[in-house]
Amino acid sequence: MLHTVNKSPFEKNSLSSCLAHAKEGSAILLIEDGVYGALKGSKMAAEVQDAMGKFTLYALGPDLKARGIADKIIDGVKVIDYAGFVDLACENDKVQSWL
Amino acid sequence: MATMNVNGRELEVDEEGYLIDLSQWDRAAGEELAKSEGVEMTESHWEVIDFLREYYEEYQIAPAVRVLTKAIGKKLGPDKGNSKYLYELFPYGPAKQACKIAGLPKPTGCI
Amino acid sequence: MGGDVKKFMYVNRKAPHGTVYALESLEVVLIGAAFEQDVSVVFIDDGVFEIVKGQVTTEVEMKNFSNTYKALEMYDVEKLYVSKDSLEERGLSEDDLIVDVEVKTAAEIAALMEEQDVILSF
């Protein structure tokens, strides 16, 4: 399953809740303010890094660039574009949005 | 949506005649917008228009008159950085009228 | 303009592009600058993301208003404060910001808030 998270992890617990409830092997895509969850050296970074053993983590490139953090993200987070977003949505049987 | 014809191109403008897409602006569009404002463009006018476009490019905002006056003074000298000079060029308000001719949105805070 | 000068503080706590709060706040600051009051702008929590440098919004097709913060100085809005804790929690430092700011502790920001006549929150 593909999970998308579009809220800042510093303002809402959408990302933590997603990480806690997603099944191992899921794809997790950070979009909009959700991309702040990929920030290197933040107070969320350890939790996200731990989760990377269980899930494949993606972040939407255009949203990273808009926020000026494209070069500040945790190693191993896969950056994708809009076409990659569409591919992920097609590859997975279901999409769940963590709002 | 209202449009304005510039050499055969139809450019969208809002209900007050401001250009919708500032990337469509060129000197010909500026001339046409000036005509709608009853302003006859001279080199002095273009100097202010070019300044406004550069300012917008850098700050993504059309400056308030007070800020425009100060910034023009800094760049083009005190004889141009004063409201008398700018109002002579753009009688209905340098920020409002010049911004329109420059293809920029109405300055923030302008009623 | 005359009259009493009051101390106005704008408190920004929202990330820039996900909601309209940041842009609205910036516009209110710019409009308010015409009234020649004693203005300060504070960035706390996700508000610090508003002034992160290097924002490029072409692909998301939104206005890149981060450049507009650089114009605040010309509007005589010169007191910009940033929460030290908020920066650190996000792995950011003063060097990551697009404008010159004063980094303040929570206690220092609390003291500044006490000095104000009006506080506007976004």
Image: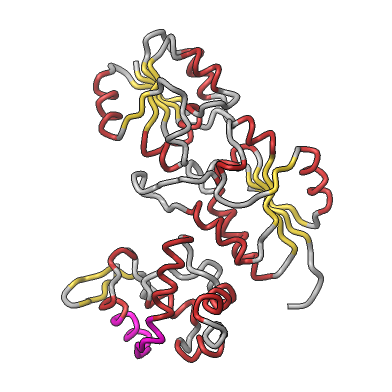
Q: Is residue C121 above or below residue A61?
A: below
Identify the residue shown where x is 37% and y is 32%. A60
Q: Is residue B79 above or below residue C12?
A: below
Identify the residue shown where x is 62% and y is 59%. C29
Identify the residue shown where x is 46% and y is 60%. B60
How many numbered discs sit on the rendered protein? 0
Identify the residue shown where x is 58% and y is 35%. C92
User: Which residue is more in the foreground, C16 or A96?
Assistant: C16
Q: Which of the 4 image quarters holds residue C4?
A: bottom right
Position of the N terminus of chain C, as image quadrant, is bottom right
Percent position (x, y) of residue B105? Answer: 42, 68
User: Which residue is more in the foreground, A68 or A36?
Assistant: A68
Q: Tell me if C63 is positioned left or right of C35 in this view.
A: left
Q: Tell me if A32 is positioned left or right of B20 in this view.
A: right
Percent position (x, y) of residue C103? Answer: 70, 43
Q: In this orientation, does residue C14 appear?
A: no
Q: Is residue B36 magenta?
A: yes
Magenta-colored span: B31-46
Percent position (x, y) of residue C36? Answer: 70, 69
Q: In this orientation, does residue C72 appear?
A: yes
User: Which residue is more in the foreground, C19 or A29?
Assistant: A29
Q: Tell me if C82 is positioned left or right of B23 in this view.
A: right
